[in-house]
Amino acid sequence: MARMRFLCDIERCIDCNGCVVACKEGNGVPVGINRRRVVTINEGRPGERSLSISCMHCSNAPCIAVCPVKAIYQREDGIVLVNKDICIGCGYCFIACPFGAPQFPKGDTFGKRGVMDKCTFCAGGPAPTFSEKERRLYGQNRIAEGKVPLCAAMCSTKALLAGDGDKISQIFQERVARRGTGAKAPGWSVAY
Amino acid sequence: MAGVANTWGYGAMTNSMNDIRHSKCIFMLGSNAAEAHPVAMQHILYAKEVNNAPLIVVDPRFTKLAAKATDYVRIRPGTDTAFVMGLVNEIVTNGWHDKDFIQKRVAGFPEMCEKASHYTPEVVEDITGIPASEVKRIARILATHRPGTVIWCMGATQHSIGSSNTRALCILQLVLGNMGVSGGGTNIFRGHDNVQGATDMCVLSHSLPAYYGIKDGSWKHWCRVWDVDYEWMKSRFHSKEYMNKKGFTLARWYQGVIQEDKINQYTPIKAVVFWGCASNSQSQYHKLKKALDLLDLVVIIDPFPTMTAAACAKDNVYLLPSSSQYETEGSVTSSSRQIQWRFKVVDPVHDSKDDYWIMNEMVKRFGFHDKFYKNIKKIPDDITRELCKGSLTIGYNGALPERIKKHTLNWETFDVDTLKARGGPCDGEYYGLPWPCWTETHPGTPILYDISKPVAKGGLPFRARFGTEHTYWNGRKENLLAAEGVYNPGSEVKGGYPEFKNIVPGTNWKTDLSQKTIKEAIKRGMAPFGNARARCVCWNFPDQVPVHREPLHSPRPDLVAKYPTYPDKKDQYRVYTRFKSEQRPELVKKFPYVLITGRMVEHMGGGAETRSNKYLAELKPHMYAEINVRLANNLGIRNGDMIWIESPEQGRIKVMAKVTDRVDEKTIFLPFHFGGMFMGKSLEANYPKGTEPYAIGEPANIVTNYGYDIITQIQGTKEGLCQVSKA
């Protein structure tokens, strides 16, 4: 069984935010909710690097472990999803997540949060596949259509890879091996 | 583009985006492709990764592209020619130039070297701020990594010596022998998806479509194509003089209204039509706004009301809502000279009409509908057919609508590396029939001036466009045709030859509508436009060889004396244009910081469309100015503070400070996509209700300075001065 994963190639990501906008447009995500973000470090200085990040669909996902109502579950292919009919908006998952993936609509009173929203790997949700309810609550179900998630499909430099973990790691390994830039091992650039 | 066309024949990208995959070195000057051309980055990064190609980025700003560079070179704005000629000098001095290529295919080399010899690494360091050792190091990288490609954008062109900058870059490639080969070339990235198409159709004031110019012969050629009477056409003009007189340019048209500079036209301009054009992308915008308020009529044809509509204080505006590209169809030409058919996705929504409908209704009301649409029955196919028929200069004649559609519908059959179809219905042809596509069976020309292929298979020599012989200022006479032994495989003549003419008496390859001349040339294995040398010396330019001239508003008064600008130009595109009289060395005392502008990836052009998209507006909601950390601290400005930026022309804008190391201590950077504010005031109430953009801000161009290129009159928005203060 395929294990779905994301991989962002840091040498390729140019911080264009194409992934972010594709995700939002394609899934009808409200303004203020970010299923995916591009993070940049050392901005404007040598060593500037960007990375596109979302829910990483962890094995042993901490969000699942802390959810008091068992609203979050993991599919057989590794995709972690939330059932919005069950979620109570407590925010434990947000605190547990190492990537800041769970998102909540901004409420007007303290503690009044809506249900959690996060990256679905474009695999819809627990509502019937291709149903109106699935689309409204979770967005597209491109996995069921046999397509890769919108973010990876849109990536202008093919930095963001998504799909079966074995396959994308193979693509990435081939890419690294073909890079003429050497092994990048410590001391490599000064060795003679 | 004028600089490029005057070097070797055509003013377009010589290779293609995909061909960059074969480069052994990528030299990018005045380009921030990571933000302006993100999709092209996949080819650039591929060459960097797979070929281990050095990626050299020359820019005043540490851009997102610079973040991907192997070698970043910070340059003082407006000194590109000095740097590039310095590289040329260093390459020639060390004997790294391609002697065989230069001897056989290049003209004016010794004369060029004489001028370049001034730019020693030490002189370059003084002018550009780039250390002499860096000049030497970069020259060595270029010499040891061939073929390399040179890429530039508006960072190179938007200067008072923009056309010298582009020529210097061409000379660099000639000296390295990087022309006419895969992985080499000058790859000039155009701004939008159809800028090359718009240029080819000459949406310009000095030429009819396909670069025919506006002389009598050009008008007669197009009148034959359109099948209208030349005398009738003449009768439509105020007088014959104006039929052949270059018009106002996009950069300076508003002077035709406000007349702060003297104009050379019998009347001021009374009406203006903006068709898909953002007025806030023009410099000294506060003066343009003055013009908007004086005009009798302003027509805006656009999917959004645009900044122009909001800027007009007078009730003189008509908005014609046009549909987007997804709601119409037709041919578009990419930066790589490739033509593609854009199919319609949905019918126009929100009561908008497509551009063809709007044009049709206007022409009807003007009363020459019968003549305008004489050859056009089916829209848009017949429009493409008509333009192909007339555009012989750039070989659009083979790119018929049926062929374009076939390519677009079968694009999976083309190879990503070579652009060539392998099998399938387009077997052997290059994707999008890159022009020139000489005949209905020609595969297109993927790389210009490549003599390794027969002309019939997409090869070409340099174009013979500048005569057959020239005597230089030093008395040396040179044959401008290519040397013996330089020819495309199968050529009847085994060396240089002039252009084809009089195959059909009284015509040449550009004006023979029967296309017999072109077919005859191809049959004989030769290029219709001849086989000549590329020029290092352009005797029709004020600087025959590119030399450094300080920007009009320079931060270095000492260099103004040494490298002064040109004398004023009395009649440049119908308007008096100041050079010498505008170059005031004392200006830097009151306006101590250099001002540059550029793009951000989230917004596009004037931003009317992207600032009206909630997700893009969410990502980049504010207009800002990039200011260096040291400068900000010295001025007591903190990140997020509001600041005033003022120009020598009394333009001022209030924007948010973004404190960053991207720019150096002397430079302020502004993105130019914002609109909806004007010198501290919101214009939001001026938009029709419900059409206000999600993000509004001050147009950067309110503070961009006076200054225009000597040849093309492109605005010098990458070399102004400004003052900064806390708001």
Image (cartoon, rainbow, N blue to C red):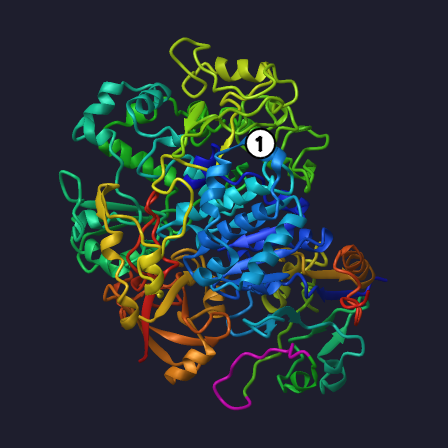
In this rendering, does residue A137 appear at all? yes
In this picture, is B596 found above or below B543?
below
- Residue at 38 percent across and 34 percent down: it is B473
Residue reaching furthest to the front: B475
Residue B571 in the image: x percent, y percent? Answer: 22, 41
Q: Residue at x 50, y 41 (%)?
A: B344
| In the depicted structure, whether residue A25 falls above or below residue B723 | above
The part of the chain drawn in magenta is A99-111
Q: Could you tell me if residue B327 is visible in this image?
A: no
Q: In the drawing, does residue B337 fall left or right of residue B272?
A: right
Give the chain letter at badge 1: B
Circle 1 Cα neighbour tier, 10 Å, few/some/many (<14 / 14–19 / ≥20)? few
Which sits in the foreground, B85 or B715?
Answer: B85
User: From the image, which quarter does the N terminus of chain B lie in?
Assistant: top left
Hey, what amino acid is under mark 1? Gln
Q: Secondary structure at mark 1?
A: helix
For the view shown, which residue lies furthest in the bottom direction? A110
Furthest residue to the top?
B505
